[in-house]
Image (cartoon, rainbow, N blue to C red):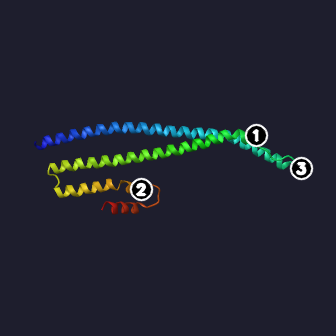
Amino acid sequence: MDIFDKATKAVKEVGSSVVNTAASVGSSIGNATREQTELANLRIQKTAIEKKLESRYAEIGKRYIAYISDSFQMEAFDVTDVLDEMQPDLDKVREIVEQIDLKEQQIRQNNLEKDRKRAQDQFESEKKKLDKARDLDVISEDEYDDKLAQARKKLENFETLKKIQMQYEMDIITKEEYEEKVKNILQ
């Protein structure tokens, strides 16, 4: 097989890889959009119930002011009727908050899985590129081994690198600290 045939084969493989990646990305975007929509709907429901509760809180406040204003009133301050009306809404808000927490956890987990898959795909892509370069005698066996070991180390330390990236994005560490930590892990 001459170099032209090898290059043609490599281009075809890269094209197939691009098509497969595009299909995967489209599916991932659809799922992420659906999850975000569900989360937004839960938040809207929570806000609507909280708005409804505000009028009841105002009623409690009005009754309390009336009670304090009429200090000679012998009746006890009683808002149990308002609290009884509020209880189903308060229960619903608690339920929605739990659903929001679960949905956010699910989204975080899905994002982590996508990032892990992306890291695996990047490793596979790097390995294919290095395999082709070695087969074409563009790099030596030692260079191949070094570069493959570095790519493997990046994949094996995915979670640690992800945490360091999050620290940097949250302004917990500086860019220099970020680069130093990543460098130490990948050495």
Does residue 22 appear to the left or right of 171 in the view shown?
left
Residue at 48% x, 40% y: name it. 36
Q: CA distance from mark 1 to mark 2?
A: 50 Å
Against 129, residue 15 (above or below) is above
- Which element is circle 3 on? loop
Relative image position of residue 87 (x, y in whole percent): 68, 41
Neighbours of disc 2 within 10 Å: few (<14), some (14-19), many (20+): few
Q: Which residue is mark 1?
A: 81
Neighbours of disc 1 within 10 Å: few (<14), some (14-19), many (20+): few
Mark toward the viewer: 1 or 3 = 1
Q: Most extreme residue toward the right, as rendered?
A: 72
What amino acid is found at the position of numbered circle 2 in the picture? Lys
What amino acid is found at the position of numbered circle 3 in the picture? Phe
Res 60 quadrant in image: top right
Quadrant, the C terminus:
bottom left
Res 23 quadrant in image: top left
Indicate which disc, 1 or 2, sits on the residue closer to the N terminus. 1
Neighbours of disc 3 within 10 Å: few (<14), some (14-19), many (20+): few
Q: Which mark is drawn over residue 72? A: 3
Indicate which disc, 2 or 3, sits on the residue closer to the N terminus. 3
Residue at 48% x, 46% y: name it. 105
Res 150 quadrant in image: bottom left
Relative image position of residue 113 (x, y in whole percent): 39, 46
Q: Which mark is drawn over residue 163? A: 2
Residue at 39% x, 62% y: name it. 176
Relative image position of residue 124 (x, y in whole percent): 27, 47
Indicate which disc, 1 or 3, sits on the residue closer to the N terminus. 3
Relative image position of residue 41 (x, y in whole percent): 54, 37
